[in-house]
Image: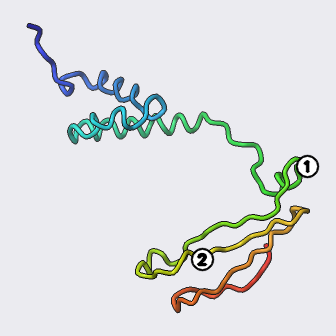
Amino acid sequence: MAQQIGFLSLPLELRFMVYEHISPVNAPVSAYQGLLLSCMTVYSEASAEIVRNARAFLKTLKKPEDESLDSRAENPNVHFQGLTAPIPLLERFHSESSSPCHHHQATLLQSGTRIPLVHQALDDPLAPSFAQHSV
């Protein structure tokens, strides 16, 4: 019968090769979660290597040339009629409140040059009161 060798008995260089192979770019977390949870030594070695590989991978991605709202609004193929973005306010500080999430509303004009924002004042005494303004 062949002698079994434990993973931690392998040289560090070989273990790092395994960690590099299971980095987030090559496999989902679920594929190597058991290995990471096996012991603190493996977790600390693998975490450092996985983070290093993820950072290296992210540096290789190309950044979009121009993602500004003005450049999109000037594109004749893009037409905005309106935009509503929910922004929960004071959820961390006032968790017992049963009131629904308040929304800030933004409407994009057809010219794409102005975005008027309408802020609603909240009944909550801890909430700031916002005035209507344009950006």
Instruction: Classify residue 103 as left or right of residue 43.
Output: right
Residue at image coords 20%, 39%: 39
Q: Position of residue 104 (x, y in %)?
A: 67, 74
State the image quarter where residue 70 is shown: bottom right
Residue located beneath label 1 in the image = 76
Q: Residue at point 27% right, 34% down?
A: 35
> What residue is at 76 percent from the left and 43 percent from the top?
65
Disc 2 target residue: 102
The correct choice, above or below, for 4 with respect to 107 in the image is: above
> Considering depth in this image, is 19 or 124 the residue closer to the camera?
124
N-term mark: 1 or 2: 1
Q: Residue at x 73, y 78 (%)?
A: 118
Foreground of the two, 135 or 85:
85
Disc 1 on helix, strand or loop? loop
- Kind of residue sitting beneath label 2: His
Which is in the foreground here, disc 1 or disc 2?
2
Q: How much space separates mark 1 and mark 2, taking CA atoms?
A: 33 Å
Q: Nearer the viewer, residue 74 or 106?
A: 106
User: Quarter of the image containing the N terminus?
Assistant: top left
Q: Quadrant of residue 92?
A: bottom left
Residue closer to the observer: 87 or 70: 87
Residue flagged by tag 1: what amino acid is it?
A: Pro
- In the picture, measured across the screen, residue 66 lies left or right of residue 23, that is right
Residue 83 % position (x, y)? 74, 64
Q: Residue 38, position in %: x, y?
A: 22, 37
Q: How many C-alpha atoms fall within 10 Å of the one at disc 1: few (<14), some, or many (≥20)?
A: few
